[in-house]
Every structure is written in structure tokens, then in C-alpha cells.
Amino acid sequence: MAQDEQVLVIKREVFDSLGSFHGLQFDVQRYLDKIFAPGVCTFMPRPLAEKDPSFKQLIPYVIMGNDGKYLSYVRGKRAGETRLVSKRSIGIGGHINPVDAMSMFNANFYDTYLDAVQREIAEEVNIASAYKDKVVALLNDDTNEVGKVHLGVVHFWKLEEPKVERKEQMITQLEFMSAEELNQVKDTMETWSALCLDGIDKMTK
């Protein structure tokens, strides 16, 4: 990872004050109102954030679906997070980095975050379909070193057409799969995707 990369974080104590949890949390708005209140989010160097569990890196985790099937892929060897290589995933996303418009004290910082999510996804895949974006859950897993320093913001993008192509080389075996098909390969999934699969029906209603 780049030594000077800055990533979006909140203090772990903010998360704990709202109620820490394992897996999925569907009481989304209560968390978002606090997390994206002016001055709560900040940026810090990624190498430090990866080793400091007193902060949570905010990671948008976008699940894309069309007609009962969900976009799935396997992370190739060029994946930025080496601990997830060769794992199947149903979430696309990554760290939020600062851009010129990102003022931490902007009352509309949540809107700025949503714009950043779209930019992040556009770097990974090309979507030739209209879609609706909704934040459907928060995702936390403190049982491993990766999870301890990350907090997922799970989005569901409901696509009108299943037209998605990869841009990043780390995305391989891209295809739309049903929940039944995904459950058959659940043991090959990264932890976050397995947790999301458990709640996929509730998140995509």
C-alpha cells in the first residue's frame, strides 16, 4: 500500500457508543447520522490505520443485484488487500480517499461520501445499466485482524440490467449468481461476503 495514502476513519469509541455488534446491523440511519455528523470522520495514513484498532476505516461494500441474482467475483493476485486474495466476494468497494470537496465539517458530508463511493466503484467496474443505490446495513467483524480495523457500509445497487464488466485486473470470474448458487460456494467466500449472504434477503427486499 502507498505510504502516503490517506483513508477515511472514525474513532472506535464512536462506534462503541452507538452499540458495537458482530455481523450485520440493520438499524442503519441511527449509525449514519452520528458517523457522518460534521467533524466525526477524519483521514489518517493507511499504514497507521491498518495497525490501530482504536480507529475504524469506513469501507463502502456495494452488492449489485438484478432479478434475484448478485454480482460475484474472485479476487485475483493483484488485489490490494493480500489477505483476501483468491476469496470469492459479492461486495465491491474500498477505502475512501480525500478529494478536494471533502471537508470534514461539511454538513452535507454524507452526500460527499456517496459521490466518493460512485467514484470508487467506477474504478473497479463498468456498469452499463441504470440502478438505485440504498445503504442497507452496517457490517462489522472483530474476530480477525482485518475486521478489527474496518467497518463496512453495505450498499445495495439494484440494477435494471445485469450489465457489469470488470476494469480492475484483481477482479476475476465475474458473474451473476443466485443466493442458492452462492451458498454452495460459501466456504470459499471472504468473511464479509459470507456474512452478507446470510442477510441477503433482508437487505435486498
Image (cartoon, grey):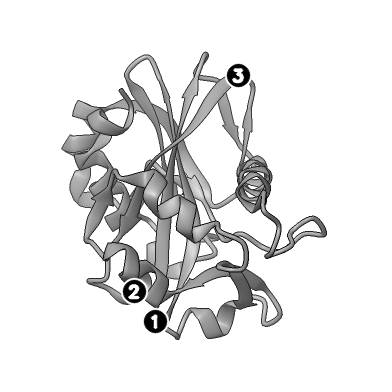
Q: Quadrant of residue 186?
A: top left
Depth order, front residue of 189/102:
102
Residue at point 71%, 57% (across, down):
106
**SS at circle 3:** loop
Tell me the mark number nearer the camera, choosing from 2 and 3.
2
Left or right side of 6 for 140: left
The answer to whether residue 5 shows anywhere in this view is: yes
What kind of residue is marked 1?
Answer: Pro
Depth order, front residue of 121/39:
39
**SS at circle 1:** loop
Crowding at mark 3 (Cα within 10 Å: few <14, some 14-19, many 20+): few
Depth order, front residue of 191/155:
155
- Percent coordinates x, y for residue 55 in the rendering: 45, 77
Q: Which residue is mark 1?
A: 53
Residue at point 33%, 63% (across, down):
18
Say whether disc 3 or disc 1 marks the residue closer to the N-terminus: 1
- Percent coordinates x, y for residue 193 in the rendering: 31, 48
Left or right side of 198 for 129: right
- Above or below — where is 91 with respect to 40? above
What kind of residue is marked 3?
Answer: Ser
Instruction: Determine whether label 2 and label 1 are within 8 Å by CB.
Output: yes
Crowding at mark 1 (Cα within 10 Å: few <14, some 14-19, many 20+): some
Q: CA distance from mark 2 to mark 1?
A: 6 Å
- Percent coordinates x, y for residue 119 in the rendering: 69, 45
Say whether disc 2 or disc 3 marks the residue closer to the N-terminus: 3
- Percent coordinates x, y for residue 77 in the rendering: 49, 60
Q: Which residue is mark 2?
A: 148
Q: CA distance from mark 2 to mark 3?
A: 35 Å
Tell me the mark number nearer the camera, choosing from 3 and 1.
1
Q: Which quadrant: the C terminus? A: top left
What kind of residue is marked 2?
Answer: Lys
Image disc number at residue 129: 3
